[in-house]
Image (cartoon, grey):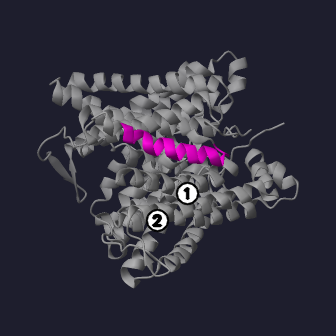
Amino acid sequence: MDYVLHLLTIVGIYVILAVSLNLLAGYTGLLSVAHAALFGVGAYTAALLSLHFHMPLLLNLILAVTACAVVGVVVGLPSLRVHEDFFVVATLGLQVLTVTIFNNWTAITGGPAGLPGIPQPTVFGLTITSHVQFLVLTGVFAVLAITVVKRLVGSPLGRVLKAVREDEVFAQSLGKNVARYKLQMFVIGGALTALAGVLYAHYLTFIDPTSFTVQESIFMLAIVIVGGSGSIAGSVVGAAVLVSLPEALRFLGLPSAVAANVRQILYGALLVICMMFRPQGILGEFAFRKR
Amino acid sequence: MPPGLLYVLVYSAEYALVAAGFSLVYRTGRVFHFAHGAVLTCGAYSLFALHVLAGVPLLPAVPLALGLTSLVGAMVESIVYAPMRRKGAQSLTLLVASLGTYVVLQNIISLLFGDDTKQIAHGAAQGVNLLGTWLTVIHITVLAAAALLLAGLAVLMRATRTGKAMRAVANDADLARVSGVDPERAALWASLIAAALAGAAGMLLAVDVDVTPTMGMKPLMMGLVAGIVGGLGSVPGAALGALVLGLAQYACVWLLGSQWQDAGAFVILLVFLAVRPYGILGAPLRRATV
């Protein structure tokens, strides 16, 4: 039973990640491969704050959200200057840069050894310890993230975002401040990623740089794209399928080293097949078919 | 001369090989070829399989492994990229497919050979002391092989029909088509040659350092940075970018310590993307849209 609860909690965390990445990649057309870095900034902020200052969850959350929003803007800055492939490279650069810092700034981040012993969070005096409590907390955060993104893309602002995605110059010609909208989305996307980061750090009570690598970013992108870019339901389905599908491999009795590879082959192949035959994903509307 | 400065040349040579292949596929095949890194790893592992596992002597093993690697590159092109291009896939779609291909190839290698570190060369290599730097036979081989391959590529691009076709397609695929050049064929050639270059880089790295399934990521990134710094699209651009990157990393090691050299490379990348995204030797792309 605990196993199912654990799986659901992880799915919930990935729903938050996918929905926030979808806001950037799916709705605004900004294909970022630095999402795992943002996730990491959130997780490390929460971990450090609770390890050194024993801060309550809410305060952790506010500071992590702020940190991620700031880093989000940094990730977004190149989008004002370069587009498409080159924007992807710029975010790739920031992704690797961030992991290098996680790995090498040993005094703060603990380096490759990571940060063990992150305390369990306290919300209004209640310490979250059991799987059920964590799942509820994750559920609340996931619903919060989904609601924020849903409200955003359903509003007139959402239509502007889609216009930016489909044709930036056109949006600009209608008097829309494209640069401002892009950076706003990175602030919001970054802030939402922090929710996932904080949950992850407290839930696992241990973080190290391997959870926030480029591969992880590609995995998040796979969830968004396979689920469907520009579709919130797609991101939820994508997270559920791509996170739990590899768990099925466990029941096939594959040794864990092999299962890890098969899992990666599976999502890599899904990504390729999706791009070849259904670029808009299972439930999506946008196919990265600019110009 | 400061110690170790000649190593800059050795690393730059490897980056330049990767950058030249990458930019060939990027310009002629119009794919942001992330899978290039995995093709490089295939090069290293095919040499490992032939030479160490099957016991084939080095001299026939190297060309055989190069052939195998080119085959992998051509397969990626003809199974993944070409059908997508025919359907009118745009650059970002191809890029994502290439990311997926990278993940698949890397993990197939992991499955076949395991995740542990393999070695091809054993023991300390002989060396010479040149201008205050200790260069091994391997380093000299890397330098000579890279120089030969890059010079060969430059000649091929300028003097042969295939090279001219690849440049024509890079310049304007539609114009090339109406002039009787087949862009698909040119893209296939580009992927074959790029894979051979990546394979060579992978083998040189394998002999110099060691062999792991994830070994392709770092040279891919450095090749990418070198290509963008120098200007994607020409052999001299790749070489110049690699040299600038190598020197910058050397300065980084000198000033901050070796753990920050990758960070330094990406800071340079971001500076170039902000100031001069088309690189030192490149010209700004003019996109004509009606």
Give the number of the disc on residue A16. 1
Circles 1 and 2, Cβ within 8 Å, touching? The answer is yes
At x 27%, y 42%, the residue is A256
At x 73%, y 43%, the residue is B286
Point out the residue furthest to the bottom here. A53
Chain for numbered disc 1: A
Chain for numbered disc 2: A
The image quadrant where one finds the C terminus of chain B is top right
Say which quarter of the image contains residue B42: top left
Whether residue A271 sits left or right of residue B60 in the image: it is right
Give the number of the disc on residue B93. none
Is any part of residue B195 visible from this angle?
A: yes
The image quadrant where one finds the N terminus of chain B is bottom left
Q: Secondary structure at mark 1?
A: helix
Q: Are marks 1 and 2 on the same chain?
A: yes
Where residue B248 sits in the image (x, y, percent)? 43, 61
Give the residue at mark 2: A199
At x 35%, y 72%, the residue is A118
Where residue A223 sits in the image (x, y, percent)? 53, 45
Q: Amino acid at mark 1?
A: Ile
Point out the residue furthest to the right here. A174
Where residue B85 sits in the image (x, y, percent)? 62, 26
Q: Where are the magenta residues, as a range?
A: A229-248
